[in-house]
Structure formats: structure tokens, C-alpha cells
Image: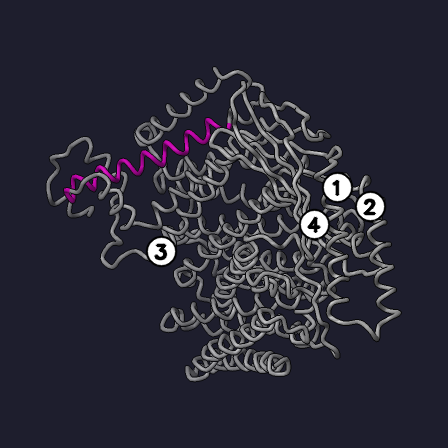
Amino acid sequence: MAGVGHALLVIALAVALYGIGASLHGARSGRRAWVDSGRRAVYALAGVLTLAFALLEAAFLRSDFSFQVVASHSSTTTPAFYKATAIWSSQEGSLLLWVWLLSLWSSLVLFLARRAVREIAPYATAVLLGFATFFLGLLVFMENPFATLAVAPAEGVGLNPLLRHPAMMFHPPALYSGYTLFSIPFAFAVGALVANRLNAEWIHATRRFALAAWLFLGVGIVLGARWSYTELGWGGYWAWDPVENASLMPWLTGTAFIHSIMIQEKRGMLKTWNASLILATGTLAILGTFLVRSGILDSIHAFGASTLGVPFLILIATMVVGSIGLVLWRRDALRSEHRLDSLLSREAAFILQNVLLVAMCFVIFWGTFFPLISEAVTGSKSSVGPPWFDRYTTPVAFAIVALTGIGPLIPWRRATVRNLRRNLAVPLAAAAVALVALALVPGVLDEPKAWAFAGIVAFVVAGVAQELWRGTRARRVMAQEPAPMALVSLIRRNRRRYGGYIVHAGFAVLLLGVAISSSFERSKDVSMQPGDRTSIAGYDVRYVRATTRTGSEKIVFGAVLEVRKDGRHVATLTTTRGFYPSQDPSLGIVGRFFNGEAESEVGLRAGLGRDIWVVVAPDLLPLQRIIEEGDRTFAAAMRSVARDGADVDGEALQQLFALRDQAIAGVARRWVTRPWPADFRLIVSPMATWIWIGAIITLAGGAIALWPAPAGGRRKVTAAYAARLARDLARSSREAADVA
């Protein structure tokens, strides 16, 4: 079957090359048959890659260790759920996942746009197939996922313990979906530049895919943050890790693009900016893939290191040079049709927000690649840490959130004093009330960053609530619907607009959680043994007992802690540290468990007010003697069996395995029966849960905006109409029909 899989990849590469040639020939000659043939090549590519991916997935599920990639990333003891995810834990499998997702999304967009953007589509097809050709070339010639071993081992290495988390099923596919989806507006932008079709046509064809890319990338980022918070044991949800930054950068520029294209659609402005922005976003998406899989920068995602740096750098350089060349070539055709009428306008707010988003992306880019820049300039590699990122990104984040609240409240073209007073009065009052109320809370003014941010968030949420209320009120009068039904109808009829408002509110809540939790977090590292107590942020914490769990796959040391406040029971927390065996047999049957990988399970009491977080780090030094004794006993038994190998039977092997299990159980029992002090990290983090609540609201708003509006339901009920209707509910039916 391995040969069949590799043959499918070769066929896919040939199909991609044919599709490029057919699309370009059709575009240059004007022969639609060739253009259609190039489009069908994308469909065929999706079919072939689906078969190849299914074949490799089946090899993982049935533990076929004749496949090198399966033997290196799975085992018979790996649960089926994680066998299914192990395919993209590998270098080869992740590349196959990338190109497979690209083929699926490309097929979808070309099918939907088959009767539109006819001049642009062939060039876009060629670009998308060019990406596919690159990744297929890597798979065929450098990272063959169907490579086989001369002799299949009886057991595989297994999945990296840090990847044994439910998020593994969704986090990498979501990120890769985001990366590949951003390739679609990138390709159509290139097509528009080549074909000199630089109106909003290419934006209309790909706008929904850009929003889908933003949504998938956001889901991936949030899942990764939650994974870090509950699994890795460092107590944080964001560490400014290079691979984390790699996903955030295209998300930021993609956010800017989604906002700025509205200006081009409505006013014919920012053509150069929008083309440059999506070209940069597509390049950053490839850069993200590069950082995940190249190993060029030190990262907690070190399992993704490889030797693919040079091919990726060539691709990225080609994209950068080509993008700049295309924009310069079409600079005359990219001139705006209108100019900015006023600095007090929605266009101006969007432009400023775009500048800030790009500025934040640049800061993150500089900090991420500073080690390489430093090494190139000075010869020594140095890096910047989280405090550096926080120092420069925090004020920019403040301004961005403020603009998310101001922008929707300012009209297009030009704002009047009357309009500003009517739209800003309620949000400003809400912000003032929030600031005054929080100022009365002890200790809040000691953290001015969090205090100010709360005021901004109150402004944003109040502004969104005001727009929803005005629209709902208008809908109630116009359609004679109850308030809940009027709200639902309002959002259904203009999902892009009101979904965007919900995104703004959710994003503000998310960043409020970040600001409060980071400003008022209290942490403590302490050594305790059962019966010991400590205190943190007004909570009393007692180490109740040690726990353990053993098996052939891992040894787990755990601890149970009781949390009380003012004598009242608050929570019982259980935290564990799991040790997985190394594949090096020379380390001993017991010792190898403590020289392999390890993973933490966090004890967490989450609440709307605060999270109580704890993780244990057992000191292994007191176990050293018993580990060595167990290894010696088992080694002696192994030598005895080897000497009398001719007489070995099932019973002897069973006794040998029983001795192994006994040695492992003896180590684990020592942790429980005679526990020694263990190191704990305790964290009390106010409002951390609001990060996840805000993320859910944000992604829900994005999903609403992405979902197609019902037929006949695209006409808008505007906020301006709602305001007029509030002043005069007896307005004529003709006016109501005009707005409906």
C-alpha cells in the first residue's frame, strides 16, 4: 500500500503541473476549454489527495509499522483517538494535511466562482496549483510520508506525550485551514493584478474565504492558548513563542484586510493597500507554516524541527519579490477612485485601525526574528522575552480596541456634531460609570492599565448594545415582532454587519480578561509534603495526599490539594505529572521512564471571578536508589532468561513481565507510602475565564458574519433609521418600506 500512496502523490504532482499549464494557456489564448480543464485539474487533485490522506490515516489506525512515519509517531498502546491525530504530528503528515486542505478549499472557491471573475480565475488557479506543486514536490522528493522500513518493528515509538490532548484533533487542522484559506484571496489578488481587473470583483469572490480563514485561524489560536493553560504546566496561555507568533501575524493582517475591503467596496479607495495587505497576509501564512516545520527558531514546538528551511525560504522570497513587482507594475490602475472626505469618518477610523494592526504585526515580527537578526549583525544570538512584547503591544492593543468601539458609531464620509453626540453619549457614559465604579474597588488604581482597559471595554460593549437595541426597536415597529424575534431577524438579515459588532464586543471582553488576569495575577512556588499548608491571595491551600497510577506506557505521580477561604471549602484540586519511557533500553526498565518525555495535568478551579491553578513537579532525586535497584533486579532476571533461552516458555515470559510491573509499581508505591516534599506552582488569576468567554463570543460573531444571509433578507435596517423611528414612531408606512 505504501507504493500506491507514493504513486498517488506523483500523480497529484503531475495533475498540479498540468493544471498550471492549462490555466495559463487558457488565459493567454482566451480558450475557455483550457481554463475549464485547469479548474477540473484542481478537482482531480482534491480527489487524489483525499485518497492518499485516507491511505496514510488507515496505516496509522491499524498500526502498520512498515510505514516509517507510523513507526516513529504511533504505537499499539496509543489510543485510537490519538492514532488518528498522529498523522499531523509528523513532518510528512503535516505537509500532506496542508496540501490536502488547500486542494479542498481551492476546489470549493473555483466551483463557486466558475461563472464569475472569468478573467481572474485562471491566474488564481495557477497560483493555487503552484502552492500545491511546492508542497507535493517536498512530499515526493524530500519528505515521503509513504517511506517504508526494511524490517517492520513489533512496536512503534509512540506519540509525543505533549501532543496527547483532545485539542490535538482540532488545533493543527484549524491552523492549517486558516493558512490555506488565506492562500485563496492571495491567489485571486495576484490574478486581479495580472489580469488588470482591480475593481472590487476579486474581493466579492473571495471575501467569505478571507473571513473563513480569519475564523479558522482564530479557533486554532484560542485552542492552542487553552491547551497551554491546562496542559503544559507553566501557568500561562500565551508565551510569545515563535510558533504562536507565526499564527498571530497573519491573523492581525487578515483582520486589517477584512475591515479595509469595506472601504474599497463602498468608496473605491485603498486599492493599493488592500492588494498589498492580502499579499502580505498570504506570505505570512506560508511563513507560519515555515516556522512550525523548519526549526529555524527555538520553540516549545521543537518536535516540528526539520531541514526544510531552504525550500521554504525560496518560496517566501519568491512571494515577496513577486508581490512587490506586481503592485509596482499596476500602481496606476490601483489609484483610488475617491479621497478621504474627513478625518471624522468611518473610513478614517478603519484606516487608523489598519495602521495599528499592521504596526502590531511588525512589532511581533521584529521580536520573533530578532535572534536571527542579532546573529546576522553581531555574530551572537540574543532574544527578547515576553516583557519586551508586552511593552510595545499593550498600548497598540488599547488603541485598537478603542477603535473597534468608535468605528461603527461614526458614519461614512463625514460625521456631524449632532451625529457624534447621539451615537457616542451612551457608550461614553457607560465608560465613565465603569471607571468610577472600579476606582472605588481597593487596589484597582494600583494597576492603571487594567483600570483604563475596563473603561474602554465598557465603551465598546455599550456601543454594540446600543446598535443592537436601535436596530431591534426599529424591527419591532416595522415588522410587529416581539423583541427576541426582532433581534434574531435583525441579525439574520444583515449577518455581516451585526456579526461584526458581536466580534468587536467579544474581542474587547477577551482582552479585558487578558488585562485583568495579567495585572492582578498572584503566583507562588512552594515545596510541600502531605499535611503542609500555604496561602496565596487570601486562599489557604493544604496538600492532602499523594496519588499514583502506573502502566506499561507511563508512570503518573499526582497530588490532591484542598483550597479553603475564610474557613469555607472552595475546591479540591488534583494535579499530576506523567512520565513516559524513553526508547533507549540502556537506561533500564525503570530508569527509562524518567529519562523520556513528561507532561503535566493542571489542577484548575475556574470561575467567573478568578481561577485557582496548581501544578506539581515531583523531585525525582529520592527515587534514584529504588530506580537503580529495580533496574538491577530486572537486568539480572533478563540475563538469566537469556542464558537459558532454550527453556523459555510463556510462563517464564509472564514472570519476567510481572517482575517488570512489580519494579514499576514499587517506585510508584514509594511516592504514596512515604511521600517526600514536592514542588508546586500555585496561581490565582482574576477573570481569566473571561478570556475564553470573549473568545467564544468573538468566534460566534465571526461565524454569524460568515454564514450566508437568507434569500430576500439582505436589505438592512440601519441604526440611523432606528434613531429616527425612536423620535417619531408614527412615521409613514412608505418610510418603513424604504428601510425594510
**Residue carrying label 2:** 626
Residue 389 appearing in the image: no
User: Compared to 6, does 329 lie above or below?
Assistant: above
From the image, tell me which residue sits under label 3: 707
N-term-proximal mark, 3 vs 1? 1
Mark 1 lies on residue:
670
Q: CA distance from mark 2 to mark 3?
A: 61 Å
Task: Name the kind of residue labelled 2 in the image.
Answer: Ile
- Sequence-wise, the earlier of marks 2 and 3 is 2
Residue 640 picture quarter: bottom right
Task: Please name the residue shown 51% across and 82% down the image.
Answer: 22
- Give the image location of residue 463, x and y in percent: 36, 33
**Disc 1 or 4, which lies upstream in sequence?**
4
Q: Amino acid at mark 4?
A: Ile
Q: Are marks 1 and 4 in contact (CB under 8 Å)?
A: no
Of badges 4 and 2, the one in the foreground is 2
Q: Which color mode does the image show?
A: one colour
